[in-house]
Structures are given as structure tokens and as C-alpha cells.
């Protein structure tokens, strides 16, 4: 990006970029971000901000090639890369390869439309790995197929992204009908659409369910885009959206080994107003504790969202086959399953999680390689 104009004032550098966009860089910001403020190897800031005057004085600025040379009254000289000034204009978020806008879906997403990638290709080719992550980020869900028939085959694919998120259910978990279950997932009953572990301070990010066997009658999967549900609620019933995004409710999981609780809203909105997280799990929502005056309106809003999760207009349904793995953003996409009859065949999913931080980190590294 080329500069069209540059003007040094005492308290700020004023630039106009070739596209006509103006940018103002306050002098203290310039000093705080001077390349000399960073360790040459680690690229971490080593400057002590308090060692600077609160209002350093900029004397002049000259553009020369790829840098702008800045002289300050205390004798310091900065060689600011033009690229740094172009990429970090105050008031504009810096570009981020991991900031992939969600593409909301409803029942218009059919099983055939689910982004689909072959495990051997992901494992062998970073370009495919990147493409898979980009699609998974945009849709919130993807399917990996051609997995080997061994317990760790899905985990190996997840580990191409980053390290696993351990929870009270372990580093990985087996979804099978068990004799002494501590979780409804480990029975054969229907699991209505939900997100996993909203009782955690930070619920797990991406979830991986590798299907090793799905031979029982029933046991089909269903999914819904929680961001689409939330946006439709915002449009149709703003008061319900307000309650679900402003009132924190208690969530709790407890068994013999853990008692994990948090308060959080069903819908989390980020600082730009965009929906950034959904926590939905009626099985581990604890006893509501908001003031009695709010309870009737809250229940109305909560039931409304619950009714939307039951509406086929939002649902994607299909049955996982052995060798397939469904991958989804557990803080966006709700998942569930039909009941199954364990007497008719074996059903086994092997699961794990990778948090959003690791997922986004991998996307950024792949973008710069
Ligand atoms: C889970 C879960 C879905 C399934 O383990 O959290 O929702 O298909 N399982 O069994
Ligand atoms: Zn689940």
C-alpha cells in the first residue's frame, strides 16, 4: 500500500493512503510500536511503556522506500515499516486469516452439501488441511471420511490442528451405551440438539466424533446452526434474544469425580454485536436462579429457543457411517442423535475436542507458510 500524503504533528502522524483513506497514528502509539520496542528473536515487546514520556513529541516524518523515518524530541529515531502502518491503522482491525465469517445455514444445508474431506488427503497435504479448516470455520461443520478402522485415526486428524482439549471426560471419550453411565450420551436414549459442556467456564471449541461402528437400528445424527437460530430469534423476537443474551443461567455437571458449574448466557454476543457462542443443553442447565420477576419472561424466551431447535427448518440429519468423522464448532453448532437399539447392533463413536484458539492458530500458520 502506497502513501499519498504524510504529515507529522507533535502529537500524531497523519497519513493518507493511496486509496484515499486517512489514518491517524498518535505519537505514543508510534513509540509503543516502534520496531526497536520488540525483541529481535521472539518478536515480543520489550519496551517499558512507563519509561517513555506520557506525551512524546514527534518532530518530523520522511517517507523513504519501504519505511517512514520518524524523529522525536527525545532523540529517538524510528524506522517504521510502511507495511506495519498500513496493516495497523488505528480504528481498523488488523487482517486475520482465522477471522472467517460464518456462513449461516438452515435446512438448506443437505448431507450432500456438507463440506467433505478425505483423511488421507488432510494428513498428507497442508493445502488440503487449510481448505478443510476454512470450510469448517465458515460452515461450523464438516465431514472427514476414509478414516482407517482404528481407534486413534480420528484423533490423529484432530492433532494435525493442535493439541487436544482435555475435560473431565478425559483426553478422548467413547460414545457407547455403557452399563453405568455418568452422561446421557453414554446411554442409548435420544439426545436432543445440544452443545457439549456449557457448564465449563470455556466450553470445548471444535468437537470430533469419529464413527467406528453404527450398526444398531436408529442412532442417526442431527445438527443445527446455533448462530442461524440466534439470528432468526433476534429478528423475530428481539426481547427473547435480549433475555437469552443478557441473563446468565447456571449450568452444572456432577458425578462422583467432578462438580463443574458456571453461570453464562445461552447466547453470547461479541463486542461488535455478532453472535459468537451458543450454550444450549437442557440436561445440564441447573436450577434457574434469576429474580422471580424475570423468570416468566425468561422461560418464555428459553422455550421459544427450545422450540426453534425442534423445528425441522433448521435441521440437518444423516447417519454417520464407520470410517466417517463429523467435526463441528461446539460453541456454534448444536448436535444430537436419535435413540438406538443396542440389541440390534454395535454403535461406537470416539470423540475429542480441539479448542478454537488452537484451530485459529493453525489457520494462521497455514496462511503464512
Ligand atoms: C456426545 C453426543 C452424539 C451421538 O457424546 O456428546 O452428543 O451421536 N453424542 O452419540
Ligand atoms: Zn454431545
Image (spheres, rainbow, N blue to C red):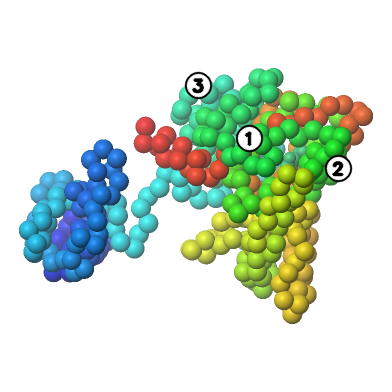
Q: Most extreme residue toward the top, as rendered?
A: 149
Q: Nearer the viewer, residue 218 or 161?
A: 161
Q: Position of residue 73 (x, y in %)?
A: 8, 64
| Residue 230 visible | no
Rendered residue at 59%/45% (across/down): 205
Rendered residue at 42%/40% (across/down): 364
Q: Most extreme residue toward the right, as rendered?
A: 343
* Residue 340 position by quadrant: top right
Left-right relation of 307 to 99: right
Q: Which residue bears the numbered disc 1?
A: 171
Q: How many labels, in total? A: 3
Q: Which residue bears the numbered disc 3?
A: 124
In space, the residues marked 2 and 1 are separated at their CA atoms by 24 Å
CB of mark 1 near ligand 1 (< 8 Å): no
Q: Position of residue 3 (x, y in %)?
A: 18, 55
Left-right relation of 86 to 266: left
Between disc 1 and disc 3, the foreground one is: 1
In space, the residues marked 2 and 3 are separated at their CA atoms by 38 Å
Rendered residue at 21%/68% (across/down): 54
Helix, strand or loop status at disc 3: helix
Tell me: residue 330, above or below residue 219. Answer: below
Sequence-first tag of 1 and 3:
3
Helix, strand or loop status at disc 2: loop
Q: Position of residue 93 (x, y in %)?
A: 37, 56
Q: Position of residue 113 (x, y in %)?
A: 64, 38
Q: Which residue bears the numbered disc 2?
A: 189
Sequence-first tag of 2 and 3:
3
Amino acid at each position: 500500500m502506497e502513501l499519498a500524503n504524510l504529515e507529522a504533528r507533535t502529537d500524531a502522524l497523519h497519513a493518507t493512503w493511496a486509496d484515499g483513506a486517512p489514518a491517524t497514528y498518535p505519537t505514543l502509539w508510534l513509540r509503543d510500536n516502534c520496531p526497536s520496542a520488540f525483541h529481535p528473536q521472539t518478536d515480543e515487546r520489550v519496551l517499558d511503556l512507563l519509561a517513555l514520556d506520557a506525551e512524546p513529541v514527534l518532530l518530523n516524518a520522511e517517507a523513504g522506500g519501504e519505511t517512514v523515518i520518524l524523529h522525536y524530541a527525545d532523540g529517538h529515531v524510528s524506522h517504521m515499516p510502511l507495511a506495519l502502518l498500513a496493516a495497523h491503522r488505528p480504528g481498523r482491525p488488523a487482517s486475520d486469516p482465522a477471522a472467517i465469517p460464518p456462513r449461516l445455514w438452515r435446512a438448506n444445508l443437505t448431507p450432500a452439501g456438507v463440506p467433505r474431506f478425505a483423511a488421507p488427503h488432510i494428513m498428507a497435504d497442508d493445502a488440503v488441511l487449510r481448505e478443510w479448516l476454512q470450510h469448517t470455520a465458515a460452515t461450523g461443520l464438516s465431514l472427514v471420511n476414509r478414516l482407517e478402522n482404528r481407534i486413534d485415526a480420528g484423533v490423529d486428524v484432530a492433532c494435525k490442528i493442535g493439541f487436544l482439549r482435555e475435560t473431565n471426560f478425559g483426553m478422548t471419550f467413547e460414545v457407547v451405551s455403557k452399563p453405568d453411565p455418568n452422561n446421557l450420551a453414554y446411554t442409548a436414549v435420544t439426545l436432543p440438539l445440544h452443545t457439549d459442556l456449557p457448564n465449563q467456564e470455556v466450553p470445548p471449541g471444535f468437537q470430533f466424533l469419529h464413527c467406528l461402528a453404527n450398526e444398531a437400528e436408529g442412532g442417526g445424527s442431527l445438527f443445527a446452526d446455533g448462530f442461524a437460530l440466534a439470528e432468526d430469534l433476534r429478528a423475530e423476537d428481539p426481547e427473547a434474544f435480549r433475555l437469552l443474551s443478557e441473563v446468565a443461567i447456571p449450568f452444572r455437571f456432577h458425578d462422583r469425580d467432578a462438580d463443574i458449574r458456571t453461570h453464562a448466557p445461552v447466547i453470547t454476543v461479541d463486542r461488535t454485536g455478532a453472535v459468537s457462542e451458543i450454550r444450549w443443553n437442557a440436561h445440564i442447565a441447573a436450577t434457574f436462579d434469576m429474580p422471580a420477576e424475570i423468570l416468566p419472561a425468561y422461560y418464555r424466551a428459553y422455550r421459544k429457543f427450545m422450540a426453534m431447535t425442534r423445528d425441522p427448518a433448521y435441521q440437518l440429519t444423516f447417519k454417520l457411517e464407520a470410517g466417517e468423522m463429523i467435526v463441528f464448532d461446539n460453541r456454534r453448532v448444536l448436535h444430537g442423535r436419535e435413540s438406538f437399539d443396542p440389541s440390534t447392533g454395535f454403535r461406537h463413536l470416539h470423540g475429542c475436542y480441539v479448542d478454537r484458539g488452537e484451530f485459529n492458530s493453525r489457520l494462521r500458520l497455514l496462511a503464512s507458510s
